[in-house]
Amino acid sequence: MPDRNGDERHTRDTRDSRDTERRRKRALFLRELDEARELRDRVQPRRARAARMRQQMRMRTFRW
């Protein structure tokens, strides 16, 4: 009969490694997204300023 604890440990280790890999990929994606936004802001300052103004207006009119 197979050892249940061993199966559970293997499943947990696999899940933990998947979660770790997912978090690593997510962090990389968010860093690249931030870099892309910074680059776009430098290349198109007028559009970036307008986007900031729109975001400020959204935040001012947001109700908690």
Image: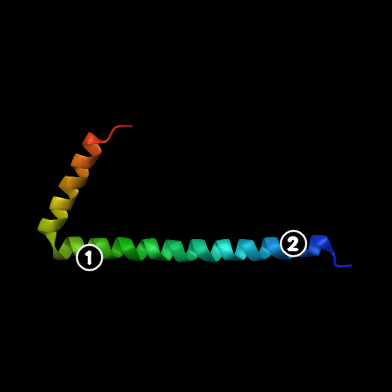
Outermost residue on the front side: it is 1
Q: Which residue is farthest left?
A: 46
Q: Quadrant of the C terminus?
A: top left
On the rendered structure, is 10 left or right of 1? left
- In the picture, which quadrant includes the N terminus? bottom right
The residue identified by callout 1 is 39
Q: What element carries label 2?
A: helix
> How many numbered circles are shown?
2
**Residue most extreme to the right:** 1
Q: Is mark 1 on a helix, strand or loop?
A: helix
Q: What residue lies at 36% left-to-right and 62% top-to-bottom? A: 31
Does residue 24 sit above or below 60 in this rendering?
below
Depth check, front residue: 16 or 61? 61
Q: Earlier in the sequence, mark 2 or mark 1?
A: 2
Q: Which label sits on residue 62?
A: none
Disc 2 versus disc 1: distance between alpha carbons?
45 Å
At label 2, counting other C-alpha atoms closer than 10 Å, the crowd grade (few under 14, some 14-19, many 20 or more) is: few
Q: Where is residue 34 in the image (x, y as percent from the top left)?
A: 31, 60
Q: Which of 20 and 8 is in front in this view?
A: 8
x, y (%) of residue 57? 18, 40
Labelled pair 2, 1 in contact (Cβ < 8 Å) = no
* Position in image of residue 33 (x %, y %): 32, 63
Q: Is 64 on the left or on the right of 26, as rendered?
A: left
Q: Looking at the picture, how far across and down is residue 27, in whole percent?
A: 43, 61
Instruction: Quadrant for residue 17, please give it.
Output: bottom right
Q: Residue 9 carries which label?
A: 2
* Residue at 56 percent of width and 62 percent of height: 20
| Three-letter code for the amino acid on which mark 1 is drawn | Leu
